[in-house]
Amino acid sequence: MATTVRETLALESFKGIRVLAGLGGLDREISTTTFIEAPDSWKWIRGGEYVLTLAYAFQTEELLLKLIRELIELNAACIGIKTERYIKQIPQSVLDLADQYQFPIIDIPTSLPFAAIIHPVQSLIIHNQERLLKYSEKVRHSFFGLSVQAAEIEEIMQALCEFTHVDLAFLDLVTNRKYVFSDTSQLPAALDTLPLKDVLKRYPHEDVTLNGRLMGYLIFDADVEKLKDRWSEIPINQAKGALLLYFQRREARHQVESRYRNEFVQDLITRNIRMEQEAWNRAKSFNWNLEGPQRVVIVDIDNYKSSLTRAISNGQGVSVMENSKSRIYSIARSFLAHLNGGKYPYAEMSDSIVFIFPSGDENGGLFNELLRHA
């Protein structure tokens, strides 16, 4: 959890402290505290500092303006000034600059020692860092456990939703499945009614890629700033890692299954099976029914090889074409499964996918439907 200027103002020891300008920047994050008393000491600012000063070296309007500009440029968190010591009153031009860039200028009472600011702020920073570390370990352990258990996408997304407390979804581009976790109807309705490109324009999203291949999108119904917060960023990154492991397992399983499935279908088509029982046993392992006469349906991608050659010669990645081919195959499988109403033998070739269906009279409607869509 990041420590903000607003949090420090709520500390017990900060009673009597006033914010003179830059109220819009109270949620700026503080990483440490530091002193500035030398005219060029701003050069050592690295970002996130709660700057403290007596302003002895910045008593003129010009010098104070330069200091504030430099601190804003270097992304300091805020500045606390004991105004009653040397400068007495901060010029209006300095206050206007701080308001413009939402950079808090804080009036520190002369009676309040700087130590009464430094120690509580540093303690708060350490406390919040400890909380974040424990939270990070909890998140990492949770997603590691899901990966070890070979969790499905739905379980990974459920865990991400519980950690981030935002409405979200995952679109699996390989299977075209949607996993939606939302308490409102806005995100589900957008996913159901809008083209994907419009959904991605409307909602913040994260690409999930495996070896250069786009596997899907994590989509969030939340502000970008909330997603950048460490409390959201940590589980999002862990969820992406768990999804990548899931896709690696799925790809490996798919490759093994595809090899044996493709060999079996090719053996069937070329009559390369010596014994009838072998065909039944191999079909049973895939839960396929090959009883009775069968017909072959081939879905061919026109000019795939020439398109692939052109893509390579133009410097485009092979993964782009392979991803397109996989999506075409997925659409074909989904469409034919819907028509056939069950599992069926199929084999993926270099530029076509082959299906085997029963050819009985009861399947006449299937082929008529295929011809209608051809």
Image: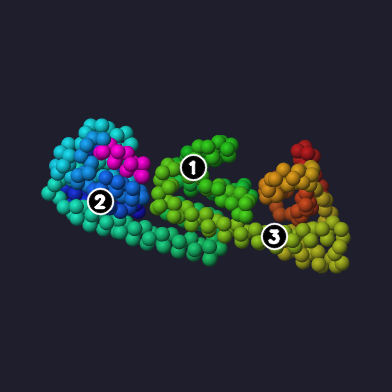
Residue that numbered label 1 is attached to: 204
Report the residue at 84% width, 54% height from top.
293
Mark 2 vs mark 1, foreground winner is 2
Residue that numbered label 2 is attached to: 35
Which of the two labelled residues, at mark 3 and mark 2, occupies the earlier sequence position?
2
> In the image, is 235 to the left or to the right of 288?
left
* Secondary structure category for the residue under label 1: loop
Marks 1 and 3, how far apart at CA? 33 Å
Residue that numbered label 3 is attached to: 255
Report the residue at 79% width, 61% height from top.
263
> In the image, is 77 to the left or to the right of 159?
left
Q: Give the range drawn in magenta.
A: 63-75
Which of the two labelled residues, at mark 2 and mark 1, occupies the earlier sequence position?
2
Locate the C terminus by quadrant.
top right
Marks 2 and 1, how far apart at CA? 39 Å
> In the image, is 51 to the left or to the right of 237?
left
Which of the two labelled residues, at mark 1 and mark 3, occupies the earlier sequence position?
1
Report the residue at 40% width, 53% height from top.
231
Mark 3 vs mark 2, foreground winner is 2
Report the residue at 42% width, 51% height from top.
232
From where the camera sits, is residue 343 visible?
A: yes
Q: What residue type is labelled 3?
A: Gln
Q: Which amino acid does label 1 sit on?
A: Pro
Give the x, y percent position of residue 128: 32, 56
